[in-house]
Image: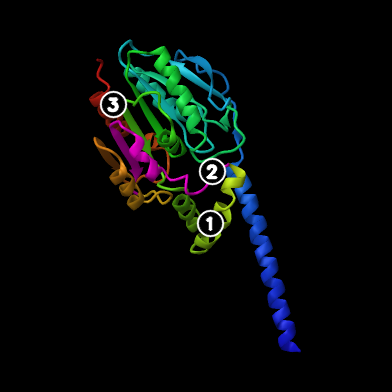
Amino acid sequence: MHFTLTLRQFSYSLVVTVLLLAILSFAAGELLSRPVRKSAGRVPQDIKIQTVILQTLANQSVSGWFIQGRQGQGAVLLLHGVRGHRLDMLERARFLNKAGYSVMLIDLPAHGESTGNRISFGFHEAKGVTAALRYLTQQLPDEKIAIIGVSLGAASVVFASMPAPPSAVVLESLFPSITEALIDRLNLHMGVLGTYFAPLLLWQLPYKIGVSAKQLRPIAAISAIHAPVLIASGSKDQHTTRAETSRLFQAANAPKELWIIKGAGHEDLHTFDRQIYETRILIFLAKYMQPH
C-alpha cells in the first residue's frame, strides 16, 4: 500500500513537473520571439539625417536613417543586435560619417519602428537587409557598399539575398547556430539543465516564427557571402564561444580576418574600446572601399 502511494505520488509529481516545464518553455518562447517596439525619438541635430521608410518583398515596412557622406567614398549599412534598434548603432554612424562614408541605420523587422510579427533570429530580418541594400544601390549606384552587423544583425547579413556582393562585411558576435546559441545562454543561467531545456524551446520555432532550427545555422550559410569579411568577437564572450567563432571563421570565404577583442564579452564591441574598434574598422574598410 505504501509502495503504491509512493509510486502514485511520484507519477503525479512527474506529470506536474512536465506540465510546468512545458508552460515555462512556451512562455520563454513567447518572450524571446515577440517583437520589440521602440521609437527612435527625435532625430539627432548634430548630424544631417534623412528618415527613410522601405518596403521588403514580404511587404514589411522598414524604418531607418540615411546620412550622406562624401561623394565616391562609399556607404556602410549598420545592423543592430536582438531586441535593439537603430539608435544602438548611432555612435558607429558618427565616426564612419566623419571618415567620409555615407551611412544607413535601420530597425530590423520586428524591432524598433519596423513592422514584423516575430523575432526570427536573423532569418526574416534578412529581408530588411535586402531592402536597405537595394535602397543604397539606387541612391549610390556607382559606390561601394559595406555592412556591419552585430549578433542578430550579423545573422541577418548571412541570411540576406543581396542585390550585388558587398565590398566588405563585418560580422560581430555572430552565433554559428540557433541550437548552440540557445544552449550557451541557457547553460549560463541554468547550468547543465539548460542542455535539456533547450529542445523544449527549439521545437516551437516552426510554429512561432515559421523557421526550423536546421534553417537557423549561419555557419552553413556564411559561405554565400562573396566579399572580404572581418569576424569579430570578445575573448570572454560566453554567449558565442571562441571555439564557435573560430568555426565560423573557417567556414567563411577568403579574404577574411579574425579579430578576438581581449577582455570583451558578448557586448557592444565599439563601446568596449572605442579607439581600438574605430581604428581596426577604418583600416579594414579602407582596404576594400577605395573609390573605383
In this rendering, is residue 286 above or below 116? Answer: above
In this rendering, is residue 217 above or below 281? Answer: below
The secondary structure type at the circle numbered 2 is loop
Give amino acid for label 3: Leu
Which residue position is annotated with label 2?
A: 211
Which residue position is annotated with label 3?
A: 285
User: What residue is shown at x 62% (from left), y 55% (from top)?
Assistant: 25
Q: Which mark is residue 198?
A: 1
The secondary structure type at the circle numbered 1 is helix
User: What residue is shown at x 57% (from left), y 29% (from top)?
Assistant: 112
Q: Nearer the viewer, mark 2 or mark 1?
A: 2
Give amino acid for label 2: Val
Snapshot colouring: rainbow
Image location (x, y in percent) of residue 63: 54, 22
Task: Looking at this view, name the residue that lies furthest to the top.
Answer: 71
Image location (x, y in percent) of residue 177: 43, 48
Disc on the earlier residue, 2 or 3: 2
Q: Quadrant of residue 61?
A: top right
- Residue 229 in the magenta stretch? The answer is yes
